[in-house]
Every structure is written in C-alpha cells, then in structure tokens.
Image (tube, coloured by chain):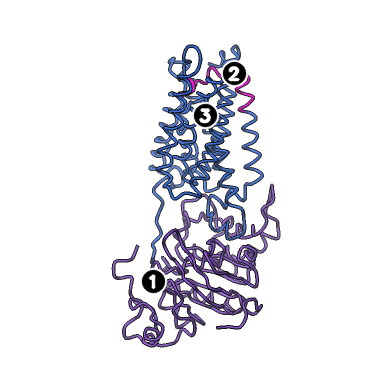
Amino acid sequence: MLEAIVHYSFMQHALLAALLSSVACGIMGTVIIEKRLVMMSGGIAHTAFGGIGLGYYLSIEPMIGALAFSSLSSLGIASLKRNSHTNSDVLMGMFWPLGMALGILFISFAPGYPPDMTSYLFGDILTVSRSDLIYMLVLDAIILLTITAYFNLIVVYLFDEEFGTALGLNMTFIDYLIFFMIGLTVVVIIRVIGIILILALLCVPPAVARMYTNNLKKMILISIGLGVVFCLLGLWISYQLELASGAAIVIVSVLAYFLAVGLERIGFGKHRPMTVRESAPSNL
Amino acid sequence: MNKANHQPEYAVVVKDLTVQYGNILALQEINLTIAKGDFVGIIGPNGSGKTTLLKSILGLVRPTTGAISVLGMPPREACSQIGYVPQMTNIDRDFPITVGEAVLMGRLVGKAGLFHRYSQDDRIVVQHYLEHLEIAKLVDRQIGQLSGGQLKRVLIARALVSEPQILLLDEPTAGVDAHSSSQIYELLKELNQSITIIIVTHDTMAVSSYLKSIACINQTLYYHGDPNLSSELIMSVYGCPVELIAHGVPHRVLGQHEQGGLRC
C-alpha cells in the first residue's frame, strides 16, 4: 500500500481524508458521547441526504446541498429540542427518515439518469477529490477554532449545563453552536464513510479513548489518533482484499472497541467503560 | 408582611410569585423575604414546588407572574452573587473531569469571553476553598472516584469559588450517609457566619439543629419562621401537609414520609 501512496494521488487523497475526518470526529465524537447526543447526530447525518438529493436536482455540488441541509437541520433540531415538549427520540424518529425521504424525492425529480448514491451512503475514501479535501480542511479549521475559543464553556455545557446557566453563562448559544458543529462534522466525514456509517466513526474512537483517560483534552487527542488508525487500517484492508472502504473502516473500528473492552477486562485501562450512567442514591 | 421589597437587608424578596408549567401550577402567590445572614430551609413534600422556587431564585425558571429580587436585583443580574449547589443526581459521575477542574468551573461566573483561560488568581482561590473544605488532596481525582460526601463538598466548593453572598443548595444531604451529612451541616453553619444560605431539604435532622428559619411550601407558602415551632401547631395553624409531620417528635417538622413508596 505504501507504494500506492507514493504513486497514486487518489491514495494520497485518501490518506489526507482519513486525517482530516479524524480531527472532526475526535473532537465532536467526544462532545457527542459525553453529552449523549449520538442519536441526534445520526438524525442530523441522515438529513444531509436530503441536501445531496437537492444538489443533484439543482445541478449544484451535492456536498454544498449536504452542508446547507445538515447545518440548517442541526439548528432546527436544537431549537425543537429546547422549545417543544417532544421527546428527542421521537424527533429523531421523524428527522432521520424525513431527510432520506427528501433525498429520494429530489433525486427522482433530478434530470437525466439517477446518479449512484452508494458513495454518499457508504462512503468511498478512494474517490475523495482535491476540492473535497479543501472543504474538509476548511470545516476542520472552523471546528478546531470554535472548540479552542469556547473550550471552558463547552466543558461546563457538557458537564453541568444548568450550573452554567446559573453562573450567567449563555448555555443556549453553546447548545446551538454544538449542534451546528455536529452538522459540519457530518459533512466532513460523508465522503470517507458515508451517511449510514457515520455514527461508527463518531462513537468508537472516543468510546475507546475514555477507557484510557480522565481528561477531556487527552480524550479528544486520543480519539483523533484512533480515528486515523481505524481509517488507515480499514483502508489497507479494503485495498488488500478489494472490499468497500467504508464498511472496512466500520468493522475495524467496532472490532477495536471490543478488543479494548476485552483488554480492559483483563486489567488494561481505567476500568471505566461506557456503561449505563451510575445512578447516585436519591432521597427524593 | 414586611414593608418594602428592595431593602438591602434582604437577601431575597419573593413577591406574589406564581409559576406554571403548561397546565400545571407549580407555585402560587408565594410571598417570602429572606434576610441577609439567614440559614433557611425550604421544606415540602415531593412535587410541592420547592425546587421550582429555588430555580426561580436562581433565574433558571421564569415567573409566570410576580417578581423576585436578589440583593435588590433581578435574579439573572445577581447570578455572580449566588452560588448554586445542584442535586448530586444532576452530576454525571462518569464525566472525564477532575475535582480541580470541576471546582475551577465556578470561577467562570459572568466571564464568557472567547479563548477564555483560567488565571493564576482563579487557581489560588480554588486551592483556598479546596483546603477550606478539606478536599485539597483529592484535587486530581476523577469525580467518579469520590464518595457521596466528598462529591458534595466538591459541588459546594464549586459554588463558593465565585465568592457569592448567597448559597443555594438543592437537597445537600441526599445520597450522603448520616456522618457525612452532619459534617456538611457543620460546614454550612460555619459558612453561614458570612453568607446567606438557602437549602431545599427533606432532612429532619437539619430542621431544628441547624436552620435559623424554615419555609414550608406546598404550591403556596404555608409557614415561614422559627423552625422550633411545634409540629402540631404548624399543622393546625398553617396546614402543612400531614405526611410531613413526625409523630411524637415535638420539635421536628418532617417525618418519614418517604417510606410510603415515594422513594425514587
């Protein structure tokens, strides 16, 4: 594979795509699992499909459509979660298929032959183009800058949002900001792993990382590293065995998670796997 | 019952407060004044609105009608003067944060600037309170590795580092053993020498031995005053809910009402 990386630009692109998507995934994946927004993120990811369909329908770059849809839907979902009494599970049960349905609808209206959607649904890291890399880089920069600028506030938001509000901090703003960045993250990783498989790359690296650290910053850094390893290992396996790259990355990630859980059982790690929240005794 | 609502000697003035969640009336026409330096317990059965009252004072819940002033200001403007200690059940003990980092959070009050970083001053104040509350040696522990009593102290320290004039605690001894809870009350008693303390509690022990006054709430305010009034009198005169009364214990207002299957 090393030889291929030196000789073929598509392999160099794949390598860079793995790196760039891991940065977004490591940061936002950590936020998502600590705030328990996994299903919300899944919903936002699937609305992006509507945007891709719209892109084809309007003959614009599908990723622009995906960016518009996922960022707007992320803000819409954040607003509904805050202001309506609807259970967030139910919201996801609606938004998730709605995005897919709109995508299918727009594609069927699009002129000409229906395009092949497989690479958007399941990702194809080997077809990442130079322009894909540029928007991934820009979105990564936005995510990185935002998380650095608001880091202390985001920690309060994740740990104890109500306390933050009591301190007079604008937690509503941070809430919208986080949702918006989930929307951006989705767009960064669609090309690598696809809409349907996105959750694996968001969840697995931080879920493994939290077994080895009690520090949020370290957790983010370890997650980024693990994301790179999973992507490259998946890429290598898919290259060697001629398998779909998205599927290979997901399978590698999930196997790595079970390996980490197994290792923890026999004494490696901090004995702190992702379990059901320990409920403190209450005298309510 | 008191003459003015913006007298500086009052820490909190609640005037005609009504809070409604949709169709559910949580609080109705509450009038309550809390003097500076008071140590007041807000007491009432489950669903009586005591946490709602606490959150209204914090500005987390908006009044449907009526008004609250904290040190003469609306609650949202007074937030730098209020330290809040939430129930322990609000805390995700799995969260990757150490005691030191969790307490440092309290220093964020009012400062929400871009690229905010904690200053050396912030760290000095945090260290001071960690030592004061005897949890300095736990500073690098992840918060999941603490006992209930230790975590409570961490939450109290976090509320104190903003150096507030008023401390609000929601169920300060829930999930804490008897020994630790008396330590916590001793600590609050000592803190009360310089700050006003308001607690929401079910705890019978606190009522007569530590509190300076109690406010008995069940949607409306039933009683506010001396905690040592006999329970029979409170019941007959002010109509405090019967299940709150401890039978045969004259100086205790609260009883074992949790045994009726209400324990969560």
Above or below, B26 against A99 in this view is below
Question: Which of A80 and A195 lies nearest the eye of the viewer?
Answer: A80
Label disc, if present, on residue A119 of the rendered structure: none
Front position among marks 2 and 3: 2
User: Residue A228 falls in which quadrant of the image?
Assistant: top right
User: Residue A248 falls in which quadrant of the image?
Assistant: top left
Above or below, B28 against A59 in this view is below
Q: Which residues are magenta?
A: A119-136
Q: From the top left corner, tell me how far across and down residue B22 is, in percent.
A: 44, 58
Q: Where does label 1 land, which residue?
A: B45
Q: Residues within 10 Å of mark 2 (few under 14, many from 20)?
A: some
Image chain in blue: A
Q: What's the residue type where badge 3 is placed?
A: Val
- Subunit under mark 3: A
Q: Is residue B247 left or right of residue A157?
A: left
Q: From the top left corner, tell me how far across and down residue A53 is, in percent.
A: 50, 23
At horizontal 49% and vertical 80% (from top left) the residue drawn is B211
Above or below, B84 against A124 in this view is below
Q: Where does label 3 land, which residue?
A: A229
Q: Where does label 2 land, which residue?
A: A129
Magenta: main secondary structure:
helix
